[in-house]
């Protein structure tokens, strides 16, 4: 409350303090996630879920960042949803170098998955809902829909 009062008084006076308080509030709003005119829209890597109103489906967007596969030519997503088929679900390479795909998955299910990079190297999703040990001695990513 006190800061709001100070800001109003400073604005009335038209002082440099008003500019300073305004700048501080914009910075604070940016740090707390609120949208300001100084904030830039940034697309984040990871998993985005869009639940559909009908038929028990969810559009799940998977995004593997460039720094996870910097020199990759092809990335496929392999998991329970495609019977672990290595070649069935190829991701799109974006101009940024990230890889992205949207899959339509059933709601109220969990799916194990991993990324296969250039048919040689496995990578987990850094933003997976969970990691689950597999029979190969490593972890699978898990998305809960």
Image: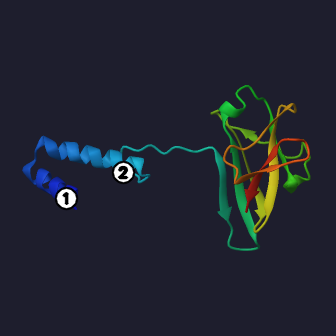
Q: Which of marks 2 and 1 is in front?
A: 1
Quarter of the image that includes the N terminus: bottom left
Q: Which of 141 and 72 is in front in this view?
A: 141
Q: Residue furthest left?
A: 13
Residue at image point 16% right, 59% down = 5
Residue at image point 70% right, 33% down = 68
Q: Residue furthest top?
A: 71
Would you say 68 lies left or right of 32 here?
Answer: right
Residue at image point 72% right, 74% down = 54
Secondary structure under the numbered disc 2 in the rendered image: helix
Instruction: Pinpoint residue 23: horizontal percent, then vertical percent.
Output: 27, 44
Q: Name the residue under label 1.
A: 2
Instruction: Pinpoint residue 120: horizontal percent, then vertical percent.
Output: 87, 30
Which of the labelled discs sits on residue 71, or is there none? none
Secondary structure under the numbered disc 1 in the rendered image: helix
Residue at image point 21% right, 58% down = 4
Mark 1 packing: few (<14 Cα in 10 Å), some, or many (20+)?
A: few
Q: Name the residue under label 2.
A: 29
Would you say 85 lies left or right of 15 here?
Answer: right
């Amino acid at each position: 409350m006190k800061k709001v009062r100070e800001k109003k008084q400073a604005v009335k006076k038209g002082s440099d303090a008003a500019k300073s308080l305004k700048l501080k509030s914009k910075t604070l709003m940016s740090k707390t996630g609120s949208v300001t005119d100084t904030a830039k829209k940034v697309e984040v890597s990871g998993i985005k879920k869009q639940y559909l109103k009908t038929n028990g489906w969810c559009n799940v967007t998977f995004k593997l960042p460039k720094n996870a596969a910097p020199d990759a030519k092809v990335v496929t997503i392999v998991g329970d949803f495609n019977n672990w088929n290595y070649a069935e679900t190829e991701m799109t390479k974006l101009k940024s170098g990230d890889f992205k795909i949207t899959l339509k998955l059933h709601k109220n299910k969990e799916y194990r998955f991993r990324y296969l990079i250039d048919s040689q190297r496995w990578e987990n999703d850094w933003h997976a809902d969970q990691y689950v040990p597999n029979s190969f001695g490593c972890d699978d990513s898990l998305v809960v829909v």
